[in-house]
Image (cartoon, grey):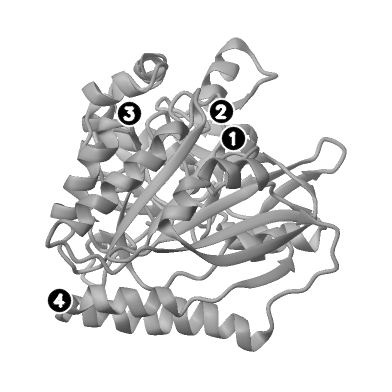
Amino acid sequence: MGTATAGKSGRGTPAAWRNWAGNVTAAPARVVTPTSVGELQDVVRRAAEDGLRVKAVGTGHSFTAAAATDGVLVRPQALSGIQAIDREAGTVTVAAGTVLKDLNLALAREGLSLTNMGDIMEQTVSGATSTGTHGTGRDSASIAAQIRALDLVTADGRLLNCSEKGTDEEREVFAAARLGIGALGIVTALTFAVEPLFLLTAREEPMAFDRVTAEFDEHVTENEHFEFYWFPHTGNCNTKRNNRSQGPAAPPGAVSSWVEDELLSNGIFQAVNSLGRAVPAAIPAIARVASRALSARTYTDIPYKVFTSPRRVRFVEMEYALPRERVVEALRELKRLVDGSDLRISFPVEVRTAPADDIPLSTASGRETAYIAVHMYRGTPYQAYFTAAELIFTAHGGRPHWGKVHTRDAEYLAGAYPRFGEFTALRDRLDPERLFGNDYLRRVLGA
């Protein structure tokens, strides 16, 4: 059996790790890239013998320190690719280090698709599901809710094959580990439900803030996937409605796509945010001009091309999941806060929805959910805005996204999640010595 590749810097010491946004760094004692599940099991056993904690990290798209460690940092990228497709069962099994973009491309070639997904494709499948990545959907939930089985290396080096059809232990672990924040072990493979490739028609339309909030429930009910973006310092929003279509496919033209996705969403947006960071007083005027420049468009394409878009402007984000019936009032409070303060916000505020699911630590666990996400351009002070927003969200019973900036601790989260104790009890059994622990998990799950 081979040994996992150790990542080193040019000076022979482990390379420092930094997340995508640049707001989290770590200095691990070892960085390893196992090329097989057996090697990963050896890595876990050796870490335990050496008294080092061990964490797996994907592409670093979380804004929290969920994957940070001063022990052994596992990079799963060598464990990638589709392992099996079961068309009769409607499932695909994929190695944990597979990037969502590669999975979506491979599925499309096979005439298959996930039912729903988030708006970026740069995460690994294990990183995305472990932190609760989601899109928006009336009936279809997060990526983790689409998992049908998973393989997990536990603290004692065992490999558990978990599903609803397994032993009592395997069923219990499956229920929780679909969204485990890395606290229960290291995921090595995931089996997702998939379906034959279908088409979605996207309708993007500017809409006034007062109208979209007044009609929010109507839009959610009438559309399979509804979301909108509010531009702070304005009364303007942009809405997006995605619904299944019989076709034919009518993707955006090359010029239109470049203008919307590259020029406006990345190129000009980057320049606007850089200007706003240098001259904050200009942000409200910029926001008014930018939000009025939006125009309606409709296009039809395969799912991942409709759900996702390139995101190259770097930012820091906080997102809270609220009971769906509370989201409009919370958003109105946020608007009043921004309008009546000296805050200068150059990023839109995003609102999405999800149906209730049965995953203990899912932000939609047991309740119909709506999400409010606030962002700040990287390098811009975000604490005042996020602190004020968090006070609003928590007052409405909000649950923070596990991979995005927040200040909540285990005491708060135990009250926000009815099945919190179920998860922590399983963690106590699987990892009593906290081999997979770190400072972030200590804060959000307890010692």
Amino acid type of the residue tagged 1 in the rendering: Ala
Amino acid type of the residue tagged 2 in the rendering: Asp
Q: Are marks 2 and 1 in contact (CB under 8 Å)?
A: yes
Secondary structure at badge 1 equals: helix
Mark 3 vs mark 2: which is more N-terminal?
A: 2
Amino acid type of the residue tagged 3 in the rendering: Gly
Amino acid type of the residue tagged 4 in the rendering: Ala
User: Residue 359, percent across and down?
Assistant: 52, 26
* Residue nearer the viewer, 171 or 227: 227
Question: Image height check: is 17 above or below 329?
Answer: below
Q: Which mark is residue 357?
A: 2
Residue identifier under label 3: 397
Residue 56: quadrant of the picture:
top left
Q: State which mark lies toward you, 1 or 3.
A: 3
* Residue nearer the viewer, 48 or 383: 383
User: Residue 280, percent across and down?
Assistant: 16, 75
Residue 161: quadrant of the picture:
top right
Q: State which mark lies toward you, 3 or 2.
A: 3
Mark 2 vs mark 4: which is more N-terminal?
A: 4
In this picture, residue 323 sits left or right of residue 444: right
Q: Going by the picture, which residue comes out furthest to the bottom?
A: 255
Secondary structure at badge 2 equals: loop
Mark 2 vs mark 1: which is more N-terminal?
A: 1
Cα separation, mark 4 vs mark 3, equals 33 Å
* Residue nearer the viewer, 428 or 392: 392
Q: State which mark lies toward you, 2 or 1.
A: 2
Q: State which mark lies toward you, 1 or 4.
A: 4
